[in-house]
Image (spheres, rainbow, N blue to C red):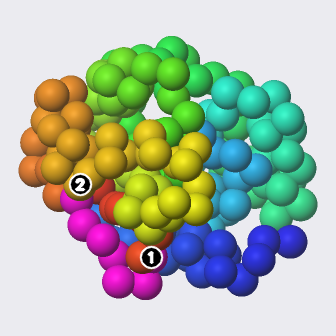
Amino acid sequence: MVPSLRRGLYERAASRLAMASPQNAFILDVGAGPGHLLVAIARELPHATLHGVDISPHMTDEARRLIESAGLKDRIAIQQAGAIALPFEAAAFDCVVSMMSYHLWDDRPGGLAEIRRILKPGGSLHLYVGRWEAYPGRLPELDYFNHRSREALEAALRSAGFEAVNVQYPRRLGTYLFASATR
């Protein structure tokens, strides 16, 4: 079961993605974890083709179980892969989403470059990143979440070649930054 707070986050993220994507979009979730966001997106965009990757075999197994129990195994593909070596052709996706995995990537610039590679021209990235400022002194291991600032995250996206970069603090998601950008 997904706690209601996280379920609400996944539902809001899926709704935001649905507003920014064509109904028949090809969408990739990088760092898909146990698949909750993919299931929420499938409900919002019933004609979309969905893929998810996670570096953890345990997480991909969990995602497969959730996807199957939701009756969506014919609509969502999940596989083990990391952000810096995505097993997809160039310009394959309309949209890439990543929720709370960016801080775990060993090579963040390489991951952003790889995401840009697999996005179609004009495709969009939707990135949810933990806000360092939300955890002052409580969780020192979170210091590296977003290079400590909104400006640094914007700079990282621009350095990877993304355009129309927009980083914001969603009102309801005070512990997160939401970044969107286009290829």
Where, quadrant-wise, is the C terminus in this rendering?
A: top left
Q: Residue at x 11, y 42 (%)?
A: 163
Name the residue tied to disc 1: 173
In the rendered image, the vertical position of residue 178 relative to residue 153, given as above or below: below
Q: Position of residue 80 (x, y in %)?
A: 70, 26
**Nearer-the-camera pick, 26 or 40:** 40
Q: Amino acid at mark 1?
A: Leu
N-terminal of the pair, mark 2 or mark 1, is 2
Name the residue tied to disc 2: 150
**Nearer-the-camera pick, 160 or 132:** 132
Q: Residue at x 21, y 27 (%)?
A: 160
In the rendered image, the vertical position of residue 12 relative to residue 158, given as above or below: below
Horizontal relation, residue 36 to residue 96: left or right:
right
> Can residue 41 be seen in the rendering of this structure?
no
Q: Residue furthest left?
A: 164
Horizontal relation, residue 116 to residue 108: left or right:
left
Q: Position of residue 173 (x, y in %)?
A: 44, 76
Q: Amino acid at mark 2?
A: Arg
Secondary structure found at label 2: helix
Question: How many residues crowd around disc 1 within 10 Å: few (fewer than 14), some, or many (20 or more)?
Answer: some
The range drawn in magenta is 167-173
Main secondary structure along the magenta-highlighted residues: loop
Horizontal relation, residue 46 to residue 102: left or right:
right
Q: Position of residue 166 (x, y in %)?
A: 17, 58
Number of marks in picture: 2
Secondary structure found at label 1: loop
| Residue 82 lies within the magenta run | no
Where, quadrant-wise, is the N terminus in this rendering?
A: bottom right
